[in-house]
Image (tube, helix red, strand yellow):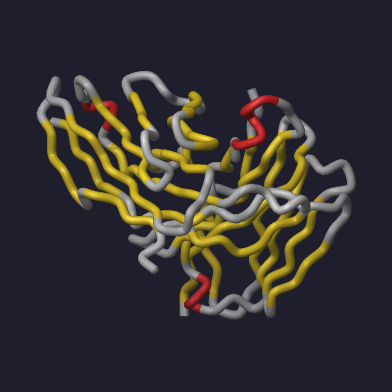
């Protein structure tokens, strides 16, 4: 079945440093979504990428979708303590039947920011 | 507008006991999901539903059953709990895709289940 791998599993940075997490799928994706989960909280939707090579920005966050639609990345510039949490990617494969409803999550990257 | 509500928030079970987790959403969403979250494993899909009266298996369905008798509710049942089912369970819902791709998932606050 579809697998979505996310690296690194953990990332510790000093406040002000940059951070990047990478997401790779074993199959071509129809789209990819990114979520953030604060410690003790639930995942919250950040953004969705649909087009090959798409790049989107949200303030200090930059999201990219690969040309082959099999990988994606999230880059945070100049991290702040409010960026602490776990970042997940989630992808949907190009498949028929009820599988159009399935979103497969990566393992997540846990980000800690030291002030 | 409460969004997605999960009950209970916490539960401790003994091996072999049964229980049902309830998920309710008031956003008229068609799709509903049950995920479990374990350290280092991310969110793994247990079962999902694309509409009232329909359910489908996810990645880790064994030991769980679900029902979607009403559009707004999605129940997750454990018939005979095992320690391996100790986890945090999240319910999520989303609307039909808008033609540009999937709509975002809206998550409940989670249920922390411990099986001893």
Where residue A15 sits: x, y (%)?
55, 78
A22 over A16 or under it: above or below: above
**Which of the two residues, B100 or B87, is positioned nearer the viewer here?**
B100
A64 relative to B107 in the view: left or right: right
Could you tell me which residue is drawn at 48 percent across and 77 percent down?
Answer: A81
Where residue A95 sits: x, y (%)?
73, 28
A66 relative to A25 in the view: left or right: right
Number of marks drawn: 0
Image quarter in which the N terminus of chain B is found: bottom left
Q: Quadrant of residue A58?
A: bottom right
Could you tell me which residue is drawn at 57 percent across and 51 percent down?
Answer: B95
Q: Quadrant of residue B87?
A: top left
Image quarter in which the C terminus of chain B is found: top left
B65 over A114 or under it: above or below: above
Where residue B79 sits: x, y (%)?
22, 21
**Which of the two residues, A75 or A1, is positioned nearer the viewer here?**
A1
Where residue B29 sits: x, y (%)?
51, 51
Could you tell me which residue is drawn at 62 percent across and 48 percent down?
Answer: B96
B61 over B97 or under it: above or below: above
**Which of the two residues, A75 or B51, is positioned nearer the viewer here?**
B51
**Which of the two residues, A42 or B26, is positioned nearer the viewer here?**
B26
Could you tell me which residue is drawn at 47 percent across and 28 percent down?
Answer: B55
């Amino acid at each position: 079945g579809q697998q979505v791998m996310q690296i690194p599993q953990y990332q510790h940075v000093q406040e002000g440093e940059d951070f990047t997490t990478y997401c790779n799928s074993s199959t071509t994706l129809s789209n990819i979504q990114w979520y953030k989960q604060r410690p003790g909280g639930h995942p919250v939707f950040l953004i969705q990428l649909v087009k090959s090579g798409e790049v989107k920005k949200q303030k200090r966050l930059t999201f990219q979708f690969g040309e082959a639609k099999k990988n994606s990345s999230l880059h945070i510039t100049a991290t702040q303590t409010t960026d602490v949490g776990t970042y997940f990617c989630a992808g949907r494969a190009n498949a028929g039947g009820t599988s159009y409803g399935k979103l497969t999550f990566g393992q997540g990257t846990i980000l800690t920011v030291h002030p | 507008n409460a969004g997605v509500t999960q009950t209970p928030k916490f539960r401790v079970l003994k091996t072999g006991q049964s229980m049902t987790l309830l998920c309710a959403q008031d956003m008229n969403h068609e799709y509903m999901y049950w995920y479990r979250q374990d350290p280092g494993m991310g969110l793994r899909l247990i079962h999902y539903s694309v509409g009232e009266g329909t359910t489908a298996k996810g990645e880790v369905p064994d030991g769980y059953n679900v029902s979607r008798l009403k559009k707004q509710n999605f129940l997750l049942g454990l018939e005979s709990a095992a320690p391996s089912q100790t986890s945090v369970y999240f319910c999520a819902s989303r609307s039909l895709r808008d033609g540009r791709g999937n709509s975002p998932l809206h998550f409940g606050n989670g249920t922390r289940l411990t099986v001893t």
